[in-house]
Image: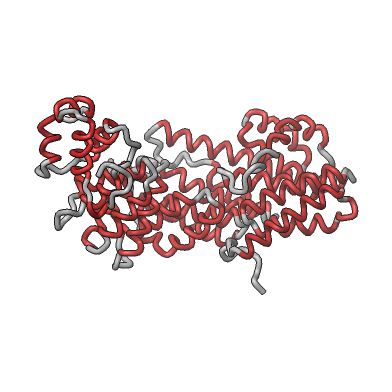
Amino acid sequence: MGGDNFLISTTTIRAELEDYIKSEGTTLHRFSETAGVNVGTLSGIINGNRPIAIGQLDRITAAMGLSEGHFYDLYADECFTSTAPHWRRLRPFLLRCAELKRNDCINQVLSRLLDDLKQIAGIFDTSEQMFEQGLKEAAVILYEAVIESERSSHSERLAISYYRLFKIHSMDSDKGFKTAMQFLPYRHRLPEVYALDGILMLAEVYSLKFNWSEAEAYADELCALAKALYERKVWRYSDFKPLRPLVYYYGRGYLFKSGSYEYRGMFEEAKKWIAEYADLSWFDADDETQTAVIEQFKMYAQANYLCMDIKTGDRSKIPKYVQFLEEEPDELVEGLITLVESANRHEFYIDEILDRYSEEIEKYRSIGKDKWFPESVVSVNRCSVFFQNYAIYHLRKRNYEEGIRSLLYSLKMAISLNNKSLIVNCMTLFELNRKFVTEEQYKNFEELCRKVWENEKENVFYGFGFDNG
């Protein structure tokens, strides 16, 4: 019975354990010492008088010289030997399965639990615990089970499940948008502390797709919610614990709103919305974190006022802006976009500045270089925008080799994001400059075109992709 050929349906963990002790010629007492399980407890387990806790099972398995999770298939069955499974036993088992990535066992348990809809609450609570512990792959399985089984469309846990899936997949350019669309109708059914974050993510998703009307709509919604919560003074309650200070969501909403006008070339209109987050000192700053956020938005406003002036062609502001970038290196990509875009729009050159940051520019080329789905969607998006502008800059200078090289980097990043606008712009610029393309660059372009086609066939553009004709 101790071999690999036994049938799960005709054996038990207890039988396997008893057979092992006999075949090894040891005693129950000696084995209990090896396993670190009390001998009385071990005896009760073998005799069937005591259920096995998952921690005990792991120690017994290790003492038998077997791999972690060896008996988990059997244990999943044994959790249902009684008429009503106990969550005190099930939850630790599911969490341990999540740690070992035994999704097969998780699905095995769920298939039994979902026969009784009263178990949905326990499944949801366990998924929340998995999420908090960073066991997100397993949490997804449980959240999806809740969504499939929840009968009430007005259920708060249904809304939270959609929100969590959106949160988990937000850095995946494909799943992030798909889960955003699934979450969208449920955002108003969330607890307000989660709604802030959910609406913020919606504004960000649409801004990454350059869908400014939608991004602005959710930015307005975010500002309105944050202000309403502030006026109700909910931030004074100890149980109101958003992921970030309330002022962050308010300022972020107006940052998106000003950005939507900036990227459409409406710079004076953008300045009106910059003013909304330039001075947020009227927010009661009752802790250092909130004060730091207010100062951060003040810094953003100062930089973005300079940015708007430069984009309208005021070259006198460039030295001050470069000084700002020296002091705030995290803003360098955004700053270089501003400078190169303005240089292209107003037909001047900034070679000295670009040479100054040449090492940083080369580092940006490595983002997304070896994989199609990079970790930071936002950073790849901004790098793709930068290299598109950087390519135009060099093509203006008739530096075609560097121009095409940068264009191909931008295209590759855009494909990883499934960003139709960036992809179309890159392909158009490539075709307009095809006569300057080397044979190797053209082969690279063909490979990228195949990737676009594969994505189109797989339908991963989720509404912002190419039309199907």
Instruction: Name the foreground residue: 328 vs 361.
Output: 361
Horizontal and vertical percent for residue 51? 15, 43
Residue farthest along the bottom direction in this orientation: 469
Q: Can residue 149 be seen in this snapshot?
A: yes
Horizontal and vertical percent for residue 28? 15, 30
Classify residue 174 by image quadrant.
bottom right
Horizontal and vertical percent for residue 110? 30, 56
Label count reads 0
Instruction: Give left or right: position of 368 versus 169.
Output: right
Instruction: Give left or right: position of 12 versus 308.
Output: left
Classify residue 22 by image quadrant.
top left
Is residue 206 placed above or below 391 in the rendered structure? below
Classify residue 224 by image quadrant.
bottom left
Q: Residue at x 61, y 51 (%)?
A: 259
Q: Residue at x 33, y 51 (%)?
A: 106
Horizontal and vertical percent for residue 66? 32, 36
Q: How is the image coloured?
A: secondary structure
Split into 4 quadrants, where in the image is the C terminus?
Answer: bottom right
Instruction: Name the foreground residue: 106 vs 315.
Output: 106
Is residue 352 placed above or below 403 in the rendered structure? above
Instruction: Name the foreground residue: 35 vs 328.
Output: 35
Q: Residue at x 55, y 58 (%)?
A: 216
Is residue 451 placed above or below 57 in the rendered structure? below
Q: Can residue 268 be seen in this snapshot?
A: no
Q: Residue at x 83, y 58 (%)?
A: 431
Split into 4 quadrants, where in the image is the N terminus?
Answer: top left
